[in-house]
Image: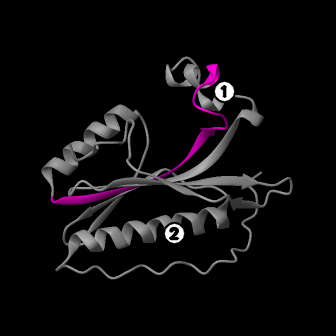
Amino acid sequence: MKPEPQPNPQPEPTEPKWDAANPTESFRRHADFLHQKARWMFLKDKTHVEIMFVFQSNGEGTVILVRGDRDAFVENLKKMIRDNDIIGVVHICEAWTRNAGKKDHVTKQIMLGEIRVSDLRPDDKGEALFTSIQSKDGQSSCWVDPIVRDATGVVSFREGFNLGKTSGRFGGLFE
C-alpha cells in the first residue's frame, strides 16, 4: 500500500526565469531550483523518481527518466550532449549510503564491487536524495540530502552537504 502524502511545511520553490544573455548563470539558478524542488517533492511524496533535466543554452529543457541499462543510458546521454547545444545536466535520484568510515572491511568490499550497499543490514546503511549538476563550462557538484524516516512514516532530511565533483557512472558527461 502506497503511503499517503503528508503536508509539506515548506512553500513550493518558484522556478527562476531564464536569461538568454547569460545561459551559464541561468543554468546554475535552475540547478539550485531543481535541488530545492526535489527536496520539496520528496517531503511531499516520500520518494523521488530518478530523472535527468538536460538544458540547452536557450533555456529549453528535456526531461528524461533514467531507465534500463545504465551504461547504455549514459552513452546515449553523452551522444545527445555532443550532438546538441546542451550546456548543463541535472540528475536527481535516491540512493543508498554507507553509515561508516572509509577504512573498514565492509566499505572496501563495496568499493571493490563484492557487495552492494543495498545488501547491508539496516543499521549499516541509509538513504539520501542526490542532486548532481554538470555543465559544459566544467561545473560539477552533487548535493547530498540524508533522508530520515521515523517509525510513523514521516520523512525529513538531516543536514545535507555538497560533494565537490560528480563522479561514477554519471560523472564526466561533458568530457
Element carrying mark 1: helix
**For residue 82, side relative to residue 100 (left or right):** left
Relative image position of residue 32 (x, y in whole percent): 43, 68
Q: CA distance from mark 1 to mark 2?
A: 30 Å
- Asked if residue 101 lies in the magenta stretch, the reply is yes
Pointer 1 residue: 119
Local packing at callout 2 (Cα closer than 10 Å; few below 14, some 14-19, many 20+) is some
Local packing at callout 1 (Cα closer than 10 Å; few below 14, some 14-19, many 20+) is few
* Lower sequence index among marks 1 and 2: 2
**For residue 10, side relative to residue 60 (left or right):** right
**For residue 13, side relative to residue 63 (left or right):** right
Q: Is residue 29 above or below residue 148?
A: below
Identify the mark at residue 36; answer none if there is no mark.
2
The type of residue carrying mark 2 is: Gln
Element carrying mark 2: helix
Highlighted range, magenta: 85-106
